[in-house]
Amino acid sequence: MSTSSETPLLFERDGAIARIKFNRPKVLNALNVAAADALLEASQAIAADKSIRVVVISGEGRAFMAGGDIASFRGPKEDASSRLLRLIDPLHAALEILAGLQAPVIASLNGAVAGAGLSLALAADLAIAADNAIFTLAYSKIGTSPDGSSSWSLPRVVGVRKAMEIALLSETFDATEALRLSIVNRVVPAADLAAETNKLAERLASGPTLAYGQIKSLMRNSLGRSLSEQLEAEADAFVECAVTDDFDEGAAAFIDKRPPVFKGR
């Protein structure tokens, strides 16, 4: 993996694991247009590669991401829309792609997880945080509303009333509180974050990828459906899973009382 300070985002394949790392450590990985474009490009590459079975998103250095690059937001009001959408549009396109992947997406969080960083963390399927991680949505502190899908994901994770508090007050909270609120799934010592993230990624990479994709779709779409619609979607998804090689292997392993060896197909 390259560590060039001129590369705003690092992307590599590690077997079945795709790794995306924001690489602007001097500014705590603040998101700028180049980084958003690179995130979209990496997401498109991942979507086109069916052999990828899990995605890990992290940040280089002392922080996951301290929000957007605020200095780049300022400028003449008459071209604010075009200027700001140059960052928001690729970010949002990337998030839609990542949400639609069959492969689970893990956010590996350390240090500042603020603004767009918290939005990205919430958009992931799972999040593991170092015990030094500090969280804040932050947008209201600069007089803006959220982007990066946090206004969609945060109420689903913590409930509308708590989401209002987090968004309106922009207070900071630590990793223990993030775990209590289910914003993260696990908290580990900072020194163990990389190893624990890899352990989780390897576990998911050896799992039933097509079933994971169905699980993601069912969970993400459930709140927009009636019970009847969700039951129909569950039945359709189960049938689709049941004709995969992984289902054959899982059923055989269950009967044989052995661990399954899934191939992701």
Image (cartoon, helix red, strand yellow):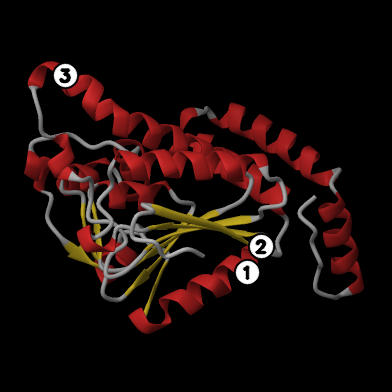
Q: Is residue 37 visible?
A: yes
Q: Residue at x 67, y 30 (%)?
A: 232
Q: Amino acid at mark 3?
A: Asp
CA separation in Å, label 1 and label 2: 5 Å
The part of the image, by quadrant, that contains residue 159 is: top left
In the image, what residue type sits under mark 1? Glu
Instruction: Describe residue 51's horizontal placement relative to residue 219 as left or right.
Output: right
Q: How many marks?
A: 3
* CA gap, disc 2 and disc 3: 44 Å
Label 2 or label 3, whichever comes before in sequence order: 3
Residue 255 in the image: above or below residue 79: below
Residue holding disc 3: 79
Residue at 75% x, 42% y is 238
Whether the residues at callouts 2 and 3 have beta carbons within 8 Å, the answer is no
For the residue labelled by badge 2, is the local secondary structure a helix, a strand or a loop? helix
Dot 3, crowdedness within 10 Å: few (<14), some or many (≥20)? Answer: few
Left or right side of 123 for 217: right
Q: Are marks 1 and 2 in contact (CB under 8 Å)?
A: yes
Tell me which numbered mark, 1 or 3, is placed earlier along the sequence.
Answer: 3
Hey, what amino acid is under mark 2?
Ala
Front residue of this view, candidates 62 and 154 = 62
Residue holding disc 1: 202
Q: Residue 153's quadrant in the figure?
A: top left
Q: Position of residue 119 (x, y in %)?
A: 32, 46
Q: Nearer the viewer, mark 2 or mark 3?
A: 3
Any mark on residue 173, and which?
A: none
Is 233 situated left or right of 144 in this image?
Answer: right
Residues packed near mark 2 inside 10 Å, few (<14), some (14 to 19) or many (20 plus): many
Name the secondary structure under disc 3: helix
Given residues 245 and 236, the one toward you in this image is 245
